[in-house]
Amino acid sequence: MAKLILSMDGLVLKEIPLTKERTTIGRKPHNDIQIDNLAVSGEHAVIVTILNDSFLEDLGSTNGTVVNGNAIKKHFLQNNDVIELGKYKLKFVGEAAAAAGGEKADFEKTMVLRPSQMKAAAEQAKAMAAAGASGAQSAAVAARAAAVQQVAAGATAAGIADKDHKLPPPAPAAAGGRPAQPLGAIQLLSGANAGKELELTKPLTTLGKPGLQVAVLTRRPQGYFITHVEGANRPAVNGQQIGPAPTALKDHDVIELAGVKMEFFLKG
Amino acid sequence: MDLKQTFDIASATDPGMVRSHNEDSVAADAANGLVVLADGMGGYNAGEVASGMATTVIITEMQQMLQKAQPYEVDPKTRQQIGKRMVREQVLKANTSIYQAAQSQPQYAGMGTTLVVCLFYDNKVLVAHLGDSRLYLARDGKFKQVTRDHSLLQEQIDSGLISPAQAKNAQHKNLVTKALGIDPSVEPEIHEYPVKPGDIYLLCSDGLCDMVDDEDIGMAVQTFAANLEMAASHLVQMANDNGGRDNVSVILVRVLREYPAARGVMAKVFAWLK
């Protein structure tokens, strides 16, 4: 469903789904979208929604209605249009874009790019580059765009749903990195190195002696876990032997492994 | 020759955090030293049909072929190595089966699958692959990618259009240039590599390598080397922790000892006695 996002000075105030056939905008309280600002007329504008299409109409307001910087009387709303009313902005998000959120995953569906398409794409890119389109960077972009267009066309022909080629790129996979979480550390309580501290900065930290008893501490978004890897005996947490599955560690848990005691704790 | 004692094999496959069903398929036959991983795509829910067909056809056909001939032998007529020919033929057979199913059944139209096949014999591994599913090798503390993806991204990297660093955030990771079952014929990329005891091979679908950095994958494989089952489930978990936007599948193969082919009568008797 299409919707409007009301904002002022870049601050989002609310989202308004366009459920009704007529959605009125104005200063007076009977409007569907009431904007209490003197720059807005009592009955300022109306959005008429018919099936998937929405039209914006100015109702003879004093200060007029501006869409994407142009004053309008009547306007067929497109995705990402920005309606300006005084200091307020209403961004229009169309049906397809609003629904796209749920389909985003499909963007990563693996599709085949046939050699013929590759060739055509490469040639197109070459032509672009030859035409002197400012440097290699733009050639790369062109090649990509051309290739994708080709694929999209091919996919349609092959009967593969190609609803994804228009969508924005997904957020980079690993670029988001691990979410912020408190750093964990262990301090040895017994053995030769008693008192020594080890910060658990890596996603995986191996503990113990290979061949005898080895456990791994894993750093995950949910926190730290201890997993038994090798050896006849499993490590114990707070005196309790752990199971075969990874065990979550809490602040100040005491781990016993290969005869050495250590304390796990979180650093603020 | 029974290779059951030679390899430690573990696998895991998971739909991930976003997809409702799993289009990946994994299969292993330790006795014959054969592992297959496929990542299906296209059609309405037909991706899993394509990947399932690929693994089943290749495993069962190869099992029959291996009973008749030894992969290390060389065909006296064509002077071609039998193993290479065997794998290529079975991949083509799987391609035909999938292609025909896709042509004859409307609900399977457009389906296909990526593929990685490893056949271990005579202290070697024969690797055939199509698409963007990968084989990695952990050896002597190093971890590297063995296969080169058949993908638009890889071609862009090769032609210098983008750097590997840019590739991480590139848009069209999902476009493969070769796949099984899409066209009436296909040419898999086949290579042979020497194997050392202690090697750990990792076959994975793009659901793993898109979500997790190679460095982290390598670290996990080496840290959990002593417990491959745990390593497999940990790899899946890492992909899911990072978002798990695609199906995740892994097969891990550790080589426990040397496995030279038993050549000659005495060697065969010896192998039989073992």
Image (cartoon, coloured by chain):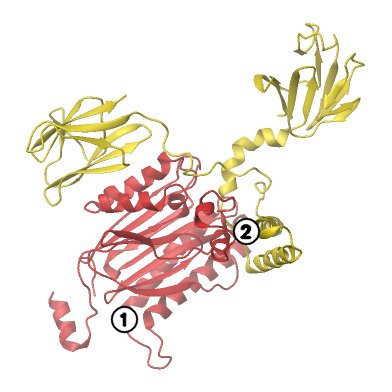
Chain colours: A yellow, B red
Q: Distance between the residues labelled 1 and 2?
A: 37 Å
Q: Which chain carries label 1?
A: B
Residue A185 drawn at (x, y percent): 25, 32
Q: Position of residue B84 (x, y in %)?
A: 40, 78
Q: Where is residue B97 in the image (x, y as percent from the top left)?
A: 53, 68
The residue shown at (49%, 47%) is B246
Q: What residue type is labelled 2?
A: Ala
Across the whole image, how many numbered discs are drawn on residues?
2
First in sequence, mark 1 or 2: give its number. Answer: 1
Query: Mark 2 sits on what residue?
Result: B109
- Residue A206 coordinates in the image, percent (x, y): 22, 44
Which residue is at 53% across, 57% downward? B163
With respect to residue A51, does A175 lie above or below? below
> Residue most toward the bottom?
B77
Is residue B241 at all visible to an observer of this figure?
Answer: yes
User: Would residue B224 be seen by someone viewing this image from the given angle?
Assistant: no
Q: What element carries label 2?
A: loop
Q: Is residue B116 left or right of residue A13?
A: left
Q: Tag 2: Cα neighbours inside 10 Å, few (<14), some, or many (≥20)? A: many
Left or right? Give the position of B213 relative to A214. Answer: right
The amino acid type of the residue labelled 1 equals Gln
Q: How crowded is mark 1: few (under 14 residues within 10 Å), some or many (20 or more)?
A: some
The vertical placement of A227 against A265, above or below, is below
Pointer 1: what residue?
B70
